[in-house]
Image: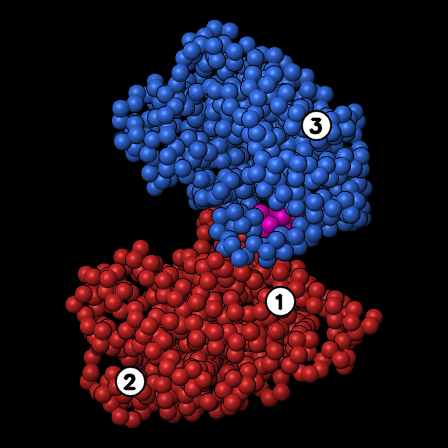
Chain colours: A red, B blue
């Protein structure tokens, strides 16, 4: 087999595997939007079959032969070429997939399906004891997975690599330690300021049909293409990039709260812009797929927070909001509104946290799950350890495990190693945005005029079109000239909150 | 390999193949309801890949080995047992699939995809000449397919068998000849009666949201389960039974016409009741699948026409319609409304035809496509032959091919042999309904009271739950005690129209 033939077959194989997986993505989207309740069981059968077929394709020995035939050939140079990136990423996922025994894959699927059901009940009933044996099983299986995959330094590296290829536990630990050290005084100053946002204005009447008009309009304004995507309603919002020309975002509307749907839509539209900006020519290969979950999250957070909670953005959108929601907002000034949507408050629930406290929620989880995987922390000790760490960060103790260690779905689903990508996303978002502001002077004037095309175009060229040609860290260096740092996020947060809360840190 | 093991593997194989196909069904439903326009090309890739994987599973030599191992074993007795029916139907589809060369399958897929596009333009522009070479290709390929599959009497048998397993061209020819002979005097009497329905009342204002409430309510009333199904909007309505617990019907609303959506919903809900009534335990095997397209169509026509256009049905629903559409119907009596929804009129377009003329449209197509496949009719002669036959049936000549031989999509898609199943459906519907009336005295009183459960239950037990344990013809004999005949349909039509049009035939 010559390298040309092998590479062509490799690419074809990857595209078909991605196409098959995209069928599962569509079924998954449907499951969470339109599936009739009685269809759930058959949907499970469909998804299990597709997962098996995809797994067979990812682990077929033929892929190993093709990789051997192309590695060391001209296709692997230069390192960031389409072919080199494609080959490198196939090698990474192939090695990972074949190292994990099929029995472990099946056991993980079986256990996490049940663990998620047990977790749902446990969270509802504030009953950690019933979830404990299942979390023990999940942790044990993830430990086995880490051992099977192998790692340079600590087992957690092996799990992290699934979500954030190229990142290491050590690097993230250092980055997060710095971030916590810098966040703490800012947060203390804010909480001690005595300034109070009028958050209740966001809990007035916001008719759902108008929220829909407003949110859809904003998503379109920032560049989400509705001829290549959709916005639907679901319980737990998500974005699903099915394939070229088809990216679907979802939200849920609360008629008594504006934030959930509006910032949710901006967040998912940010993910959606990334998916819509990937190069369709390389669909299924690294240059046409997202670089990492951290980079993906940076795109959602950038639009949700860096842009969507900024004054210039609302200088354009607030008159429109007042028109659409006169009963709720006619008597509310822009300043009052801006303060309300940027309120900082220590709270128990991660997904409701503001930009200042959010990352502390993540750091807590990152530390606990490392300790679980290393064996330093027993599952039975999780509630105590959670509450102690929470107290240290927020000077509050969760009154129940439902408001503490039972709040997130991730661990029950086997998603250990996923949490840090949220904070990486916040850090990348700030660093990218700072760079965009340098590269594109006058960006705030664009926003004030309701124009986002320069920023969207910059993100597309610098980030989306690059796909996964290089690791997230290398992409960040290429775009911003330096590795990921805490400084841009801290500078952004300080500027915002020092002015809102009239504090100096 | 012993027969037990082989049978278990065979069933598992069939269920998985059906599950994979059901993924394509969901993608197909989505394509016609919610797919963003830019996603069409990727959807094509997804469906082509799934079609290839399904075809591989249908033709894998392993299936041949399994069949050999179970045929002649205890699993094939008695003939209507679950296992015997399963094996018989796998043998039929396997033999058919392996007889057709892969090159012919691919060529048919390629040609019909293009032919459908050409046909769309040709119909729009009344340009048969541009469609002619494509129809020639399709006919030639279908002739090859018939030769490859083999047949007892005429090549058309081989094509028919794909849609109506067990039916023969000879039988249908005799049945349809009788039907035409009996329909002609009825139709002549109606057209000569001088009685005119006030059809314009159906073209008043019918607000779409109210049509939706009305249609959905009627579908639920006849037993369509919305916890195991959905109703969505599409351009060309269809019903898709995705799998157990998940059956989706679609419609389109015309704010200036009541019939399209309302009778369309009843029609699709009839298909849907069949799908929802199939035995989920046998999903993927003959006892859990529809017997034929003719039987499927009988279920839709039974609800759309036999029930849905009857006086007792409207004695229940008309007051509701008047409430929902007061502007359109407040001044219209039930008798005037009933006459309008049962108006008979010679018209050019099959899908708009009434119950008296509809089958003549089908017979014309059935005769033409037989002649095309046998070679007796050249494609270039189709417009002339169509118009001549149309004149014989309706004493009218289509002014354009758009209103003549270009109106239907079927031939461009390779669906030669499909048309007769529509009239078989009408005949089966009448024969089943006549039997149901015998078995369930007082059925009209049920309808007057808005209750359809006795009829739905009877259909489920007698037809839906039987699946494809036996051929459509054998099912009909089992349910009604005799083979398919024209008498029940003619009796039904005569009774209806002699009274409406005050004629005697």
- Discs 1, 2: same chain: yes
Image label count: 3
- Magenta region: which residues? B16-26
Q: Are marks 1 and 2 in contact (CB under 8 Å)?
A: no
View extreme (top): residue: B504
Taking the magenta stretch, the answer to whether it contains residue A5 is no
Name the side, left or right, on which B209 lies relative to B62: left
Q: Main secondary structure of the magenta part?
A: helix
Task: Residue at 57%, 76% (x, y): give it.
Answer: A466
The residue to which callout 3 is attached is: B381
The residue to which callout 2 is attached is: A497
- Which of label 2 and label 3 is nearer to you? 3
Q: How crowded is mark 1: few (under 14 residues within 10 Å), some or many (20 or more)?
A: few
Nearest the eye: B150 or A372: B150
The residue to which callout 1 is attached is: A281
Nearest the eye: A361 or A472: A472
- Chain letter of mark 3 equals B
């Amino acid at each position: 087999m010559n390298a040309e033939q092998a590479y062509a077959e490799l690419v074809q194989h990857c595209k078909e595997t991605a196409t098959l997986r995209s069928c599962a993505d569509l079924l998954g989207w449907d499951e969470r939007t339109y599936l009739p309740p009685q269809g759930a069981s058959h949907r499970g059968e469909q998804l299990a079959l597709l997962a098996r077929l995809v797994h067979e394709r990812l682990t077929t020995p033929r892929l190993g032969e093709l990789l051997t035939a192309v590695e060391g050939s001209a296709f692997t140079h230069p390192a960031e070429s389409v072919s080199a990136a494609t080959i490198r990423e196939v090698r990474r996922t192939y090695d990972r997939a074949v190292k994990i025994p099929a029995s472990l894959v099946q056991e993980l699927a079986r256990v996490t399906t049940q663990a998620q059901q047990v977790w749902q009940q446990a969270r509802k009933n504030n009953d950690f004891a019933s979830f404990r044996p299942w979390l023990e099983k999940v942790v044990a299986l993830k430990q086995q997975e880490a051992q099977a995959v192998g790692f340079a330094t600590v087992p957690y590296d092996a799990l992290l690599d699934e979500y954030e290829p190229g990142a290491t536990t050590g690097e993230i630990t250092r980055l997060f330690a710095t971030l916590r050290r810098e966040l703490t005084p800012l947060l203390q100053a804010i909480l001690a300021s005595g300034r109070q946002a009028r958050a209740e204005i966001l809990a007035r009447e916001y008719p759902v049909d108008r929220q829909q008009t407003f949110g859809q309009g904003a998503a379109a304004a920032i560049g989400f293409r509705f001829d290549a995507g959709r916005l639907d309603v679901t319980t737990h919002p998500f974005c699903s990039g099915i394939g070229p020309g088809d990216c679907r975002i979802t939200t849920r509307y609360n008629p008594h709260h504006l934030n959930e749907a509006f910032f949710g839509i901006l967040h998912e539209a940010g993910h959606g812009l990334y998916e819509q900006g990937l190069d369709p020519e390389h669909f299924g290969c690294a240059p046409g797929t997202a670089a990492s979950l951290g980079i993906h999250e940076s795109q959602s957070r950038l639009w949700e927070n860096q842009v969507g909670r900024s004054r210039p953005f609302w200088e354009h959108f607030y008159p429109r909001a007042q028109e659409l929601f006169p009963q709720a907002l006619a008597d509310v000034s822009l300043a009052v509104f801006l303060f309300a949507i940027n309120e900082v408050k220590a709270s128990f629930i991660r997904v409701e946290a503001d930009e200042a406290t959010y990352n502390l929620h993540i750091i807590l989880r990152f530390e606990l799950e490392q300790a679980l995987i290393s064996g330093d922390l027993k599952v039975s000790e999780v509630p105590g350890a959670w509450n102690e760490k929470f107290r240290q960060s927020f000077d509050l103790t969760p009154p129940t495990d439902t408001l503490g260690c039972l709040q997130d779905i991730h661990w029950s689903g086997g998603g250990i190693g996923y949490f840090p990508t949220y904070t990486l996303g916040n850090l990348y978002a700030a660093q990218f945005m700072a760079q965009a502001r340098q590269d594109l002077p006058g960006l705030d004037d664009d926003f004030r005029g309701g124009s986002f095309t320069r920023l969207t175009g910059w993100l597309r060229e610098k980030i989306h079109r690059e796909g996964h040609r290089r690791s997230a860290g290398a992409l960040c260096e290429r775009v911003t000239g330096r590795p990921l740092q805490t400084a841009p996020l801290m500078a952004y947060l300080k500027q915002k909150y020092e002015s809102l809360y009239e504090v100096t840190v």
